Structures are given as structure tokens and as C-alpha cells.
Amino acid sequence: MYKARLGITIISAILLVAWLFKVDYNDLSYKNNSTAYLGILIMVLLIIFGIKQLRKNKK
């Protein structure tokens, strides 16, 4: 289970970088970037949850 959570956390970090490339930096409005913003939010939450669970399992 530890390896699966670690894998999901690493994949989420990679996808976070990919979502950062999807943002239209010329127009940062929510209308143009809503999908990218939601993707970034989801990946950040997955990374936080993954790190929290990995720390919990080590104790």
C-alpha cells in the first residue's frame, strides 16, 4: 500500500507540472483557464493527501 500511495503522489506531481503548462498566462481569467485551474487544484490536494498518508504510515 505504501508503494501505491507513493506512486500516486509522484504521478500527481508530474500531472501538476503538466497542468501548469496548460494555463494561458496571457489571460489568467477563470473563463479561459477553468479546466487548468481545477486540474491544478485537484493535483495539489492529491499531493497533500498523499504526503499526509505517507507520513502517517511511517509512524
Image: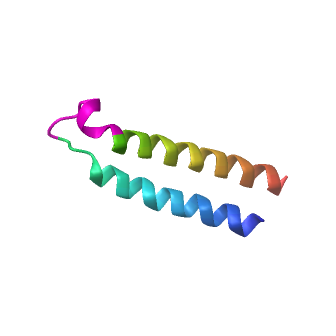
The residue depicted at 55 percent of the width and 63 percent of the height is: 10
**Quarter of the rendering containing residue 45:** top right
Taking the magenta stretch, the answer to whether it contains residue 58 is no
The magenta stretch spans which residues?
26-34
Q: Is residue 27 magenta?
A: yes
Nearer to us in this view, 53 or 32 = 32
Q: Furthest-bottom residue in view? A: 3
Q: In screen coordinates, is 14 left or right of 45?
A: left
Horizontal side of 1 relative to 37 (left or right) equals: right
Residue 31 placement, left or right of 13: left
| Residue at the far left in the pictured view | 26
Residue 44 in percent (x, y) is at 51, 45
Task: Residue 5 in the image: state x and y as whole percent.
Answer: 69, 61
Taking the spot 65% from the left edge, 63% from the top edge, the residue there is 6
Count of all numbered marks drawn on residues in the image: 0
Q: Residue at x 20, y 42 (%)?
A: 25
- Residue under the image location 51 percent in, 44 percent down: 42
Q: Position of residue 11 (x, y in %)?
A: 53, 63
Q: Quadrant of the N terminus?
A: bottom right
> Of 36 and 47, which appears nearest the observer?
36
**Residue lying farthest right?**
59
Q: Which colour scheme appears in the figure? A: rainbow
